C-alpha cells in the first residue's frame, strides 16, 4: 500500500510560524515521524510540499495509478482552491483531509473546506497526530474495501 502525503501552502514554515498554534516541530521532523509510523503500519509513503497551487494539482494528477490513498493538508488552499478539489475528484483516490489545528475553532473563513466533500473524511485539531490519525484512517479504509471486493 502506498500513500501520498501532500502539504500545501505555508506548511514549510512549521516550527517557525505561530508555534503556539502549530507547535515547534518542523516539516522535516514531521516527515521523519510519519516515515517511522508508516513502518509500523506496514505501508509506503511519499511526502510532498508546495506553496504553489498548480504544483499540488499536478502532484495529485500524477498520483493516479501510483498511489492507493492521499493525506492532504492543503493549508489555506483548503478554503480557496476549487482546482485542488477538482483534481482530487478527478483522480478518485481515497483521500483524508487533515489539519493541525481545529479549523472550526478558528476564524470563520477557515471553517469552510472546498476539499471535504470529495474526501472520505477530515481530521483536525490533534496537532501533528492529525496526520497519524489520517494515515491510520486511510489504511483501514483501503484494507476494509479490499476485503469487500
Image (spheres, grey):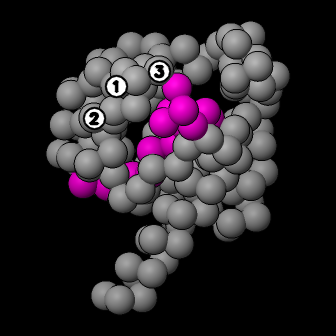
The magenta region covers 92-106
Disc nearer the start of the sequence (3/1): 1
Judge left or right: residue 24 versus residue 83: right
Judge left or right: residue 66 versus residue 48: left
Find out whether the residues at labels 3 and 1 contact each other: C-beta distance under 8 Å: no
Disc nearer the start of the sequence (3/2): 3
Q: Residue at x 18, y 45 (%)?
A: 90
Q: Is residue 91 magenta?
A: no
Q: Is residue 95 magenta?
A: yes
What count of labels does the image hold? Answer: 3
Find out whether the residues at labels 1 and 2 contact each other: C-beta distance under 8 Å: yes
Residue 122, percent across and down? 45, 50
Position of 138 relative to 21 (above/below): below
Query: Which residue matches tag 3?
Result: 107
Q: Nearer the viewer, mark 3 or mark 2?
A: 3
Query: Which residue matches tag 2?
Result: 114
**Foreground residue among 81 and 108:** 108
Query: Which residue matches tag 1?
Result: 79
Amino acid at each position: 500500500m502506498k500513500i501520498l502525503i501532500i502539504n500545501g501552502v505555508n506548511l514549510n514554515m512549521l516550527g517557525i510560524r505561530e508555534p503556539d498554534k502549530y507547535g515547534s516541530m518542523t516539516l522535516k521532523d514531521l516527515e521523519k515521524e510519519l516515515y517511522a509510523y508508516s513502518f509500523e503500519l506496514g505501508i509506503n509513503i511519499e511526502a510532498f510540499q508546495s506553496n504553489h497551487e498548480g504544483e499540488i494539482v499536478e502532484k495529485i494528477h500524477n498520483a493516479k495509478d501510483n498511489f492507493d490513498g492521499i493525506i492532504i493538508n492543503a493549508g489555506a488552499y483548503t478554503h480557496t482552491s476549487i482546482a485542488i478539489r477538482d483534481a482530487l475528484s478527478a483522480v478518485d483516490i481515497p483521500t483524508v483531509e487533515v489539519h493541525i489545528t481545529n479549523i472550526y475553532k478558528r476564524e470563520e473563513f477557515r471553517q469552510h473546506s472546498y476539499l471535504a466533500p470529495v474526501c472520505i473524511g477530515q481530521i483536525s485539531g490533534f496537532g501533528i497526530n492529525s496526520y497519524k490519525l489520517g494515515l491510520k484512517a486511510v489504511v483501514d479504509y483501503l484494507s476494509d474495501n479490499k476485503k469487500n471486493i
